[in-house]
């Protein structure tokens, strides 16, 4: 035990006694029982007469083990896992999609042989879990940097350059590409998501993700949300992608989803004007929370705004009935560099 306490067991005496005991008591020669390969059950358990009582076995020679000696085993430096910082958006996309479908297999606990077996399994859910695990490993791959190895540490801590880590082992990549033509639509979507997470998106994977944008009406909000994130991260600013991002921004209560949607909308501002147009429509909403959120999102967009949007924000700053909407509109105008117009209105 941790406190090295010693106890004596108070058990009932065994009757009848074993042959080894009564032979020894009668003065007979002690015989060693023959051991057989088969262990037979022992009948008649000995009952407890009382609870174990504290005892001191130091007089009889039984001492607790001494653990005060120093540990002489070599200590190797453990390199902390540092995933690529530029894959943070992809990491959030894959992790949230896996959480939504309860695919929680850790990529650290699988092997290449096991994944190869699962990718060719007859059950579609096994193939989906294997592909999701590959996607998780691809977005969590470590960054190529100087890391001390064990041999270098033994030689004095000399650092060795680690080779660039591939997103997925080469022997798994043909199986993942073949999964794009799988009969199951869930397997095809998981394969398309994995291809984009690996940075190897193609026309077939893009077509699958574009078709999944309308799956929210079929009860697959997680798939449509993940598809919109993948396409937006690749720079596609179509109206369907922007509409799905804005829908997620205004309909969810998860702070991480709102932050991800806002960051992707800000990235797409340089390639399309649909973002500003759809957010400007939300300024006319009857819900003051939507108007406030639209103002905050517009403040994070890049580029200049047109005169109509500026006039709308100025109108909300002065005439909206809710104080938070007025405050958000004023802050948006200030972040847009239109503080002079606000100052002129105050004069």
Image: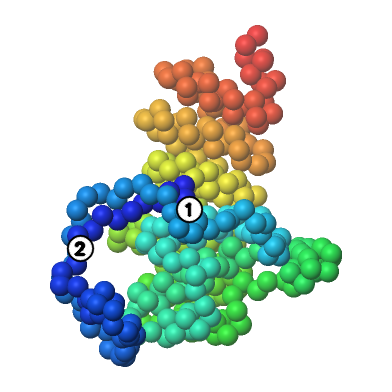
Residue at the spot x=79%, y=68% of the render?
154
Q: Choose between 171 and 62: the one closer to the eye.
A: 62
> On residue 144, which mark appears?
none
Q: Count the labels in the image.
A: 2
Q: Quadrant of residue 164?
A: bottom right
Left or right: 18 in relation to 117: left
- 328 sits to left or right of 78: left
Query: Distance between the Cα atoms at labels 2 and 1?
Result: 25 Å
Task: Give 89 or 6, whichever is nearer the viewer.
Answer: 6
- In the picture, measured across the screen, residue 30 lies left or right of residue 106, that is left
Q: Residue at x 56, y 81 (%)?
A: 173
Position in image of residue 299 (x %, y %): 59, 34
The circle on residue 13 is 2
Q: Residue at x 24, y 77 (%)?
A: 26
Does residue 153 appear in the picture of this structure? yes
Residue at position x 59%, y 63% from top?
140
Q: Quadrant of the C terminus?
A: top right
Left or right: residue 187 compared with residue 313: left
Front residue (pair 326, 261): 261
Residue 109 vs 9, above or below: the answer is below
Could you say whether the residue bearing mark 1 is in a helix, strand or loop? Answer: loop
Q: Quadrant of residue 60?
A: bottom left
Q: Residues within 10 Å of mark 1 (few under 14, many from 20)?
A: few
- Does residue 83 show up? no
Residue 130's x, y, as percent? 45, 74
Residue marked by disc 1:
58
Looking at the image, is mark 2 or mark 1 earlier in the sequence? 2
Horizontal and vertical percent for residue 14? 19, 67
**Element at badge 2?**
loop
């Amino acid at each position: 035990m941790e406190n090295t306490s010693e106890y004596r067991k108070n058990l009932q005496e065994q009757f009848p006694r074993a042959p080894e005991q009564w032979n020894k008591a009668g003065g007979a020669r002690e015989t060693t029982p023959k051991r057989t390969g088969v262990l037979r059950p022992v009948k008649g358990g000995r009952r407890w007469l009382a609870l174990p009582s504290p005892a001191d076995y130091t007089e009889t020679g039984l001492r607790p083990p001494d653990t005060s000696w120093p540990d002489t085993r070599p200590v190797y430096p453990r390199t902390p896992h540092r995933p690529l910082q530029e894959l943070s958006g992809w990491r959030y996309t894959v992790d949230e999609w896996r959480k939504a479908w309860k695919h929680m297999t850790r990529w650290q606990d699988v092997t290449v042989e096991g994944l190869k077996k699962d990718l060719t399994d007859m059950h579609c859910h096994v193939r989906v879990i294997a592909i999701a695990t590959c996607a998780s490993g691809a977005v969590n791959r470590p960054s190529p940097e100087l890391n001390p190895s064990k041999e270098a540490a033994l030689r004095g801590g000399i650092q060795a350059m680690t080779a660039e880590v591939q997103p997925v082992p080469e022997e798994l990549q043909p199986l993942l590409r073949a999964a794009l033509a799988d009969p199951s639509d869930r397997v095809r979507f998981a394969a398309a998501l994995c291809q984009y997470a690996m940075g190897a998106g193609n026309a077939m994977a893009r077509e699958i993700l574009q078709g999944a944008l309308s799956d929210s009406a079929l009860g697959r909000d997680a798939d449509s949300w993940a598809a919109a994130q993948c396409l937006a991260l690749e720079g596609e600013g179509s109206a369907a992608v922007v509409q799905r991002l804005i829908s997620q921004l205004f309909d969810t209560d998860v702070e991480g989803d709102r932050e991800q949607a806002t960051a992707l909308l800000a990235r797409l501002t340089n390639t399309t004007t649909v973002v500003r147009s759809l957010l400007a429509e939300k300024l006319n909403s009857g819900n003051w929370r939507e108007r406030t959120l639209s103002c905050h999102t517009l403040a994070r967009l890049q580029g200049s705004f047109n005169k109509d949007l500026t006039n709308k924000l100025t109108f909300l700053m002065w005439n909206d009935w809710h104080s938070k909407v007025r405050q958000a509109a004023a802050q948006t105008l200030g972040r847009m560099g239109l503080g002079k117009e606000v100052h002129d209105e105050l004069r």
